[in-house]
Image (cartoon, rainbow, N blue to C red):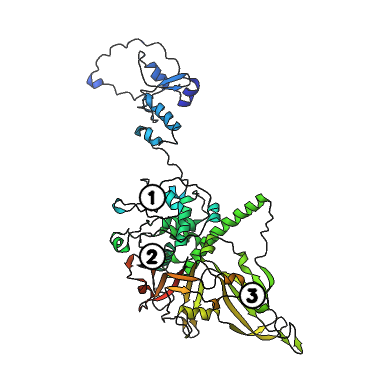
Amino acid sequence: MSLNWAAIAKKGVPQAPAPAAPPKPVEPVQPAQQARPEPPTTCTTSTLALKSEPPIDRPSLAFGSRSVVIEAIHMKLPLLIPPDHDFWKRIHDARHNRDGADVNESVPATAGPTSKPKPVSWAALLKPANGTSGSSASKGGSTNSSRANGHPDTFYDDYNSGKQPTYKSLEDALESWKLAFNAPPVQPRGLVNTGNMCFMNVVLQALLYCAPFYNLLWGVKASVAFSFKATTPLIEALIQYVHEFKHDRTPLSQTLTDLADPFVPENVYEALRKKNVFQTLRGQQEDAQEFMSYLVDGINEEMSTILCAHRLSASLVSGEVVSPGASDSSSWLEVGHHNKAMHIRDSSVAVTKTPITRIFGGSLQSTLDVPCAISGGSAFGSKGKAPPSSNREAFQWLALDVSSDNVETIEDAFDEFVAPETIEGYMNVLGESVTATKQILLERVPPVLVLHLKRFVFCPNEGVQKVHKFIEYPAALALSPKWFAKTAEAKQHMGSKYKLSGVIYHHGSQASGGHYTCDLLRSANEWLRFDDVDIDCLNSIDDALAEKKDRTAYILFYTICH
């Protein structure tokens, strides 16, 4: 009866019987009567023992106090065991030295392939096989590490210098994230248009060159422990997207002849397929502003979900009472400008604070003033008006109407945005039809101010039409105090100054068609123009500010001066 390896390890090797007598000579067989060769017998422990020769020094495998001769076994069994006495010692030493040496270097090729360790971070997952950072390697053997270029952020220095970062959870990274504007310049790279995808390409390029947003993704990539959970598909897709671009401070005039090949951001497309909102992957043109809104909102929603669960868990540990069904807003009576009472309702408190809201998020104050006069006097004082009600609302970009003939510049568009609106036939609390006044003012502005110029308007007889006129926008934008509410928080943001960092253009005359391109600030005064796979270097910012016959500015990116 043959034994398997488990039985041998458990019971030991059977004792071999005494050597058999030498076989008798076999007489020659005639060719006509030559016997067919017998099939090979199965190599078992018993047969090995029966065929054993006088004891000689042979390789053996020890199981406790037993040893198994393996010289003949390793050539016949499927299991490959190297006949080397030093092999197991090297394995043993390699395991003990695993922290200081690579086990694979101690194992000969005959040991078979070893399993690839699971990544412990995004940096390890996306690190090239040669062990160098994709962002720090450049053509010609030069190094573009942030340390060599004087970049002050520690996670760039630690990652590019090979120092092992402290891995933490995504929740901890989002909670401790700090706003930073000093992102290293990345080498430009075109995006392939696989069919009406230009509206996605310009948004992805604009976000890549938005320094705080890039720093956010790179920080997660470099310091957060990687998880295979598919709860944040958009965040994961954007991390893989920014990994496709190398850090490079070489002047544009020298790098344009040696750029990396264009690529398709398939990871982002796949994440969008899972969301099942846009028709993007079926060749249908979409609006760039709507796509950007969906993409940024989607990332913010993923972060908000993670942070809410994390904060709830932390509150339970600390013993604090958290009510998931709490009101989404709070209200109070406040004495405002000129000692006027005002009802304040803050709907922005329902917005979870995330890195996205800290980059793009601001707040508006919407005030409604409703007369309440009645015959014979006033229900609310001699002026016949109830205290105005004010609502604070969060925003991530401002939509500016440019259809009015009075709007020729961005400053004009802001004046139009904050102008009081008259509402005829408004029903007050007494059931009377009155003329109310509504006004929207700025209260808090974000580090990155995104302005959407509303170029597509609906005409009753002609449908949706595009406003083609040129709107002048400055390289430096100062927010006038007259655009702000009269609140303590608004005073902190009055006069905020911004610099232009990106422009997305729309080509064509229809909302459902056309083409999108963009001009983006790479670093200092270096501007690039992106048209899918085509990349051009602008002479100066004047090229981005100038009026263009074939395109009109549609989305403006302004970064606060810090």
Q: Secondary structure at mark 2?
A: loop
* Residue 479 image point, x, y percent: 50, 74
Q: Mark 3 sits on what residue?
A: 390
Q: Amino acid at mark 3?
A: Ser
Q: Nearer the viewer, residue 552 or 343?
A: 343
Query: Which mark, by number, is residue 435?
Result: none
Residue count near mark 2 (Cα–Cα under 10 Å), binned few <14, some 14–19, many ≥20: few
Q: Is residue 279 left or right of residue 387?
A: left
Label 1 element class: loop
Q: Position of residue 68 (x, y in %)?
A: 42, 21
Residue under the point 46% across and 50% down? 122
Q: Which corner quadrant holds the N terminus?
A: top left
Disc 1/disc 2 C-alpha distance (Å): 25 Å
- In the rendered structure, find residue 133 and report the number of the disc placed on it: 1
Query: Pointer 2: what residue?
Result: 524
**100 sits left or right of 31 in the view:** right
**Image quadrant assignment for residue 541:** bottom left
Query: Please, is residue 315 above or below residue 73 in the view?
Result: below
In primary-sequence order, the first of circles 3 and 2 is: 3
Amino acid type indicated by mark 1: Ser
Q: Which of the 4 image quarters holds residue 207?
A: bottom left
Tag 2: amino acid: Ala
Residue 149 is at least partly visible in this image: yes
Mark 1 closeness class: few <14, some 14–19, many ≥20 residues within 10 Å: many
Q: Earlier in the sequence, mark 3 or mark 1?
A: 1
Q: Is residue 340 above or below residue 307?
A: below
Query: What is the distance, in whole Å, between disc 3 and disc 2 at their CAs?
Result: 41 Å
Q: Earlier in the sequence, mark 1 or mark 2?
A: 1
Determine the residue located farthest toward the bottom in the rendered image: 376
